Amino acid sequence: MKTDARNSELTPQQRRRMLDKIKSASAYLRAYEDVAFMGKKDLRPIRLQLEYLKTETVLREHKIRSTIVVFGSARVLSPEEARAQLAAAATELETNPRTDALRRRHRHAQVRLEQSKYYEEARRFAYIISKAQQNDKELEFVMVTGGGPGIMEAANRGAWEAGSKSIGLNITLPHEQDPNPYITPGLCFQFHYFSLRKMHFLMRSKALVTFPGGFGTLDELFETLTLVQTGKKRPLPIVLFGKEYWSRLIDFDFMAEQGMINWDDTKLFKIVEKAEEGWDHIRSFWQKHRSVAPSEE
């Protein structure tokens, strides 16, 4: 008479194999350790909450009370890199002066060198404020950027050169970009959701500073302007660097003339050229709003 296999006692070897199978199955993982489970569509609300809580918790642990947000193009080069690219393009053009592609490359390198002034100004701006504001207790006016190259690197670099902390809020994109090396270790975060990243940009912000940039920069600038305009965000100084760039890109007066915005809305921001101008505007703004202003050294 055959014995039913289900009623047979397992050998020690069989028991170990069965236990190994059970423990290696994804169902046995703790839910928060199961990456595949956490990536499921139904878990999106949890992932949103985690992206909020992780950054919020770490910033509190670092005693960061307020920030200054710096936006701008990832394509802006440092003066050193821009000069090197122009020299290389000039050498190539000398060898083949009639080549259209090389002429275009040379012209592009000239534009990049001209734009590098914004890198240097962002670097100086971050240095000046970081040097003036941070102390060992609670940190005020900490530079926060998107964590990438270009203007973002310049602002993180300026804070680093001042011996101060700075934050990078990176985002996962189809074409991955590494964080720039000047962000304070432990204060560089990687986001999946643009919405949570934008929220963290503004939660502690005491100023928004925008350098020339593309679609992403404009998206961040106009979302902030809209939030302030509609009262969803408390008033804060909004500084645009580069009069020539912004006056050619957007005609704010025309928008007001057409009744698309109020004339008072054109006072929500200030266009400046130099780091000192931007800092003076931010400082003057908070001197008028001392009840909600960060402490000043």
Image (cartoon, rainbow, N blue to C red):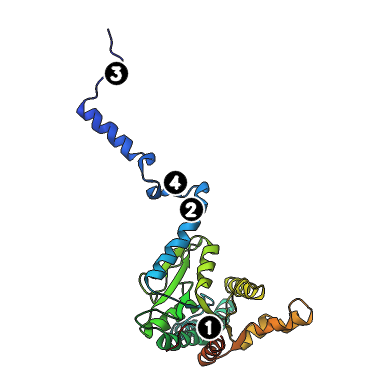
Q: How many marks?
A: 4
Closer to the camera: disc 2 or disc 4? 2
Q: CA distance from mark 4 to mark 1?
A: 46 Å
| Residue drawn at point x = 42 percent, y = 75 percent | 64
User: Quadrant of residue 6 in the image?
Assistant: top left
Q: CA distance from mark 2 to mark 4?
A: 11 Å
Q: Counting residues from the N terminus, which is met first, the one under dot 4 or under dot 1? A: 4
Q: Secondary structure at mark 3?
A: helix
Q: Is residue 176 visible?
A: yes
Question: Please, is residue 264 above or below residue 74 in the view?
Answer: below
Q: Amino acid at mark 2?
A: Ile
**Residue 150 visible, this angle:** no
Vertical side of 101 occupied by 173: above or below = above
Q: Residues within 10 Å of mark 2 (few under 14, many from 20)?
A: few
Q: Position of residue 17 (x, y in %)?
A: 26, 32
Residue hosting label 1 = 291
Task: Relative to 119, say whether 39 is above or below.
Answer: above
Label whose residue precedes the other's in the sequence (1 or 2): 2
> In the image, what residue type sits under mark 3?
Asn
**In this rendering, position of residue 259 left or right of residue 95:** right
- Give coordinates of residue 258: x percent, y percent: 79, 79
The Cα–Cα distance between marks 2 and 3, rounded to whole angstroms, is 43 Å
Q: Amino acid at mark 4?
A: Phe
